[in-house]
Each structure stands twice: as structure tokens, then as C-alpha cells.
Image (cartoon, rainbow, N blue to C red):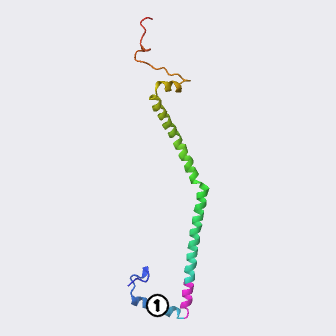
Amino acid sequence: MQPIALFLNDVAGSEIVLIILVVLMFFGSKSIPGIAKTLGQALYQIRNASNDLQQEIRRSGQEMKADLNIKDILKETEESLTGPIEQITTDINHTVHYGSMPKQVKQQVTAGNPVEEVSDNAPDQNQSNPTS
């Protein structure tokens, strides 16, 4: 047997009959259809009001989202954070590649800023000169 309603799980058939008899005694057989109609209209109005409230909340949330423009803020923040990191990565890549370049390429790259290479045979400038 399926339960009639969630709150009536513990109510037996004889108890339901007793409840119906009490309602008939208090309200009479002629007023019960009017009461049921009024109750149905009240539930309908409550349901409509609930739906209207939910729609209003959704609309205001969408308006707030549009006003805040969250996507653009996140994009700007991401760019401001990734810009320096990308610059550092590029600098490191140039440094690594510059160190492994052939001598001719190094000369072309540093044409405006010549780099002195120290060979193993050249005397160290920090050592004292015995002739002076």
C-alpha cells in the first residue's frame, strides 16, 4: 500500500475516517467544497508567488553578474599575473640559448655590445704584474 502523503505515513485508515467525520461535523457537507476550492486557490497563489520570487532572485543575480563584469576582471588579473612570469621565462630561454650559441651568432647578437671572452691562456687581470 502506498502512503497517501508524507505526513500521513503513520495514520491508519480508521484514523483518516475519524478525521473526515470531524471535518464534516465542524464545517457541514455544504461548506466542504467551498473550503477545498479556497484551499486550492491559496496553494495556487502560494506556488505562483514562490515562482515569481525565484525568477526575481535569478534576474537580480544576472544583473549583479553583468554589473560586476567578473569575466573581464578575471582576464585582466590573469594577464597581470602571467605577464611577468612569461617575461622571466623568455629571459631564461634567451639566456640558455645564448650560452649555447656558436661564436659567429654570438658576435651577431652582441654586435652593439661586444662581449670579451676569457681564454685559458690569457693571464688573469687580478694577478699582480711582476714587471711593474
Image quarter (top left, top right, bottom left or bottom right) of the C terminus:
top left
Residue 91: image x %, image y %? Answer: 50, 34
Q: Which residue is mark 1?
A: 20
Dot 1 alpha-carbon crowd within 10 angstroms: few under 14, some 14 to 19, many 20 or more:
few
Give the residue drawn at x 61%, y 60%. Answer: 63
User: Mark 1 falls on what kind of element?
Assistant: helix
Residue 78 position (above or below residue 130): below
The front one of 108 and 84 is 108
Residue 49: image x %, image y %? Answer: 58, 74
> Main SS type for the magenta part?
helix
Left or right: where 31 falls relative to 96? right
Occupied quadrant, residue 128: top left
Residue 96 position (above or below residue 11): above
Occupied quadrant, residue 127: top left
Over which residues does the magenta segment extend?
Answer: 30-39
Occupied quadrant, residue 55: bottom right
The front one of 83 and 59 is 83
Kind of residue at badge 1 = Ile
Residue 112: image x %, image y %? Answer: 56, 24
Residue 121 position (above or below residue 50): above
Residue 113: image x %, image y %? Answer: 54, 23
Give the residue drawn at x 56%, y 81%. Answer: 42
Image quarter (top left, top right, bottom left or bottom right) of the N terminus:
bottom left
Give the residue drawn at x 54%, y 87%. Answer: 36
The front one of 123 and 18 is 123
Left or right: where 2 falls relative to 68? left
User: Per the image, is 18 magenta?
Assistant: no
